[in-house]
Amino acid sequence: MECTVHWVAGAGMAFLAETGSGHTLTMDGAPDGGGRNLAPRPMETLLAGTGGCAAYDVVLILKRGRHEVTGCEVKLQAERATADPKVFIALNMHFVVTGRGVPLAAAERAVALSHEKYCSATAMIAHTAKVTTSVEVRQSP
């Protein structure tokens, strides 16, 4: 896996990342740090990537279990250290799985498997942060 990040000179603290899979991602800083608030902060991008990694696992696990999943959302709340480096020290991930007849136990198992075995992003963050999860299932018509 590879990625190249370019500072966009003349745009304050904006950065353009080019991923090995051929996609681009823009990041920016807060105005008090020289940014223009035109894109997510790098740490917000890390948080979003963690949520995407875990949600990907949950959907895949449920689909492989032949559950009729119609939606998956994960709400992440992170707390950062007050001193540099301001790593994540706490992370709560609340999963909302929507589907037809999806049992809560199956959704909880999928989240646990993601958290304990499959999600590399969560595993990395768990080295500095206490990671907690919660699960909710909503039935779709």
Image: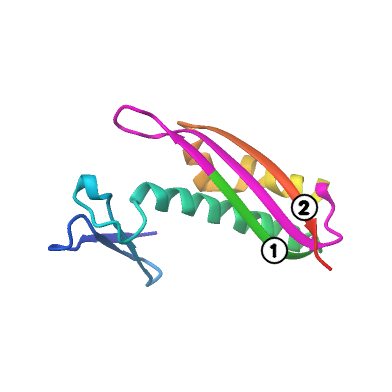
Which segment did they paint magenta? 77-104
Instruction: Tell me if residue 76 comes above or below residue 23 in the rendering.
Output: above
Amino acid type shown at disc 1: Gly
Pointer 1: residues within 10 angstroms few (<14), some, or many (20+)?
A: some
Picture layout, residue 81 above or below residue 27: above
Point 66% across, 49% down: residue: 95
Q: Secondary structure at mark 1?
A: strand
Residue nearest the observer in this picture, 36 or 98: 36
Q: Amino acid at mark 2?
A: Val
Q: Which residue is mark 2?
A: 137
Outermost residue on the left side: it is 10
Q: Position of residue 45 (x, y in %)?
A: 41, 53
The residue carrying mark 1 is 71
Residue 97 part of the magenta-drawn span: yes
Q: Quadrant of the C terminus?
A: bottom right
Residue 76 horizontal/vertical position (percent): 55, 46
* Image point (58%, 49%), residue name: 75
User: Which tag, 2 or 1, sits closer to the chain's start?
Assistant: 1
Q: Position of residue 96 (x, y in %)?
A: 69, 53
**Would residue 34 be found to the left or right of residue 71 on screen?**
left
**Front residue of this view, candidates 72 and 20:** 72
Label 2 packing within 10 angstroms: few (<14), some (14-19), many (20+): many
User: Left of 110 or right of it: where is 53?
Assistant: left
Residue 8 appears left or right of 77:
left
Above or below, 108 against 102 in this view is: above
Indicate how the structure is coloured in the image. Answer: rainbow
Q: Is residue 100 toward the left or the right of residue 20 in the image?
A: right
Predominant secondary structure, magenta span: strand
Q: Residue placed at 64% from the left, 45% from the top?
A: 94
Mark 1 and mark 2 in contact (Cβ < 8 Å)?
no
> Image quadrant for the N terminus?
bottom left
Label 2 residue SS:
strand
